[in-house]
Amino acid sequence: MERTTDNTAISQPGLALVAVSFKERLLKQVLELVGLPPVALRLWDGTTVAPVEEPEYTLTFEDPRSLLGVLVNPELYFGDAYSSGSITLEGDLVGFLEAVSRGLHRASPPGLLRRLLWRWQGRARINNLSGSKENIQTHYDIGNDFYRLWLDEAAMQYTCAYYPSPDVDLETAQIAKLDHVCRKLRLKPGDTVVEAGSGWGGLALHMAKAYGAKVRSYNISHEQILYARERAEALGLSDRVEFVEDDYRNIDGRYDVFVSVGMLEHVGVYNYRALGEIIDRSLEPDGRGLIHTIGRNRARPMNPWIERRIFPGAYPPTLGEMMEIFEPRSFSILDVENIRLHYARTLEQWLERFEDNVGPITEMYDPDFVRAWRLYLAGSIASFRTGTLQLFQVVFTRHENNVIPWTRDYIYQAEGHKLSS
């Protein structure tokens, strides 16, 4: 106890108690915001609040700014704070994010002010011709050497693999994905294929080599196009696969097959009707198509941190939103499959390889980059495990086409039209 010169008693412990109480209320507000998961929240001075006696995870705010950011807009500023190291975690990152994701499903809906703020923070960059190129370069042109460290060696696939059983390795699962797509398209020798978004060329090269198709593949990532052309040359497939460095909106010609794997997320819902028109002018009368995309069960803005820091311009659509591609042109949907748990498994294997290469990745970039991509991969695993994200494969054809399978057996035949090796 201390006294001032006017003999007024001032209780320093009492003032500290008021401060602690205020901090505790802030921490409780954060926990309530995310549905009270089994997480202890700790401040830089040791103040700790937990919703259960034995929390599974402890999240520490290392400075006041990180706490303020999460209170204002958790979806944006949590990622920034974690990436910079001003938020640290004790416990498994994927498990923590999964617990928070499940908690958010239980939490009460945000108020009007917070919804407006999230919508403003989560506005996607425009996917016009110039905007799309900038968005793609931001994510895909950061370096082939980076992606080569943790993607599969067989085909450099940066999309969901397909697991005949959960214990197969990544290389086997990615080749199985390529075959799964080709069988759904009933690909056969001599078919002409146009692909929107080639990635590093794995699917186009597989269609030509294993199924005898002739493929034209469009992509606006310069680094990916260079890699794909080198692979085509090395495999002796340059006469059967053409990699075009151009936007999907400039596709021309007529084809038996239209395919897009992992590109629709970059298109933007407002461009879906135009995409449908492009497909319509590209397909032969008995043509068929497949779109493989990350999606959602319910429309919601993209996570603003991922949209700003990792995947600019991205948006995972609902099936209902995807129908804007098909319905105006009277396309018939033949098959819809959701393989979200396959994507969770794919991401688990990517994250394992990423962690095995943290040293080289840190040398390429910096620790903040490593933490950001660790959070992105771990958060994606949690989102697919909890059903926040889906993975849709939609097969379609023209409405008057009667040359269609009688059953779905063709999808699961081991070889289909695949050429013998």
Image (cartoon, rainbow, N blue to C red):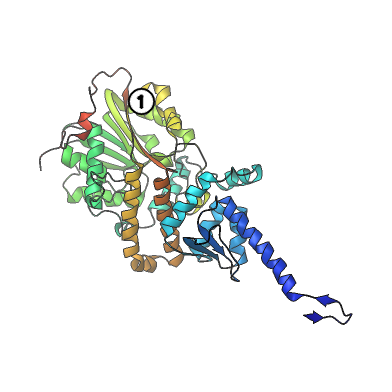
- The residue drawn where x is 87% and y is 80% is 7
Q: Is residue 240 visible?
A: no
- The residue drawn where x is 17% and y is 32% is 188
Query: Looking at the image, which residue sits at the far front?
Result: 53
Give whichever of 210, 305 is nearer the camera: 305
- Judged left or right of residue 216, residue 388 is right
Where's residue 399, x and y in %? 33, 19
Name the quarter where the C terminus is drawn: top left
Compared with residue 83, is residue 73 higher up or lower down, i.e. above or below? above
Q: Which residue is mark 1?
A: 280
The quadrant in which residue 357 appears is bottom left
Where's residue 52, x and y in %? 53, 58
Q: How many marks?
A: 1
Where's residue 368, x and y in %? 46, 64
- Judged left or right of residue 358, residue 318 is right
- The residue drawn where x is 47% and y is 39% is 128
Label 1 sits on a secondary structure element that is helix
- The residue drawn where x is 59% and y is 52% is 32
The amino acid type of the residue labelled 1 equals Asp
Name the quarter where the N terminus is drawn: bottom right
Give whichever of 136, 289 is nearer the camera: 289
Where's residue 254, x and y in %? 29, 28
Give whichever of 63, 91 is nearer the camera: 91
Query: Badge 1: few (under 14), some or many (20 or more) residues near its Cα, within 10 Å?
Result: many
The quadrant in which residue 276 appears is top left
Give whichever of 331, 75 is nearer the camera: 75
Q: Is residue 18 visible?
A: yes
Compared with residue 365, is residue 132 higher up or lower down, i.e. above or below? above
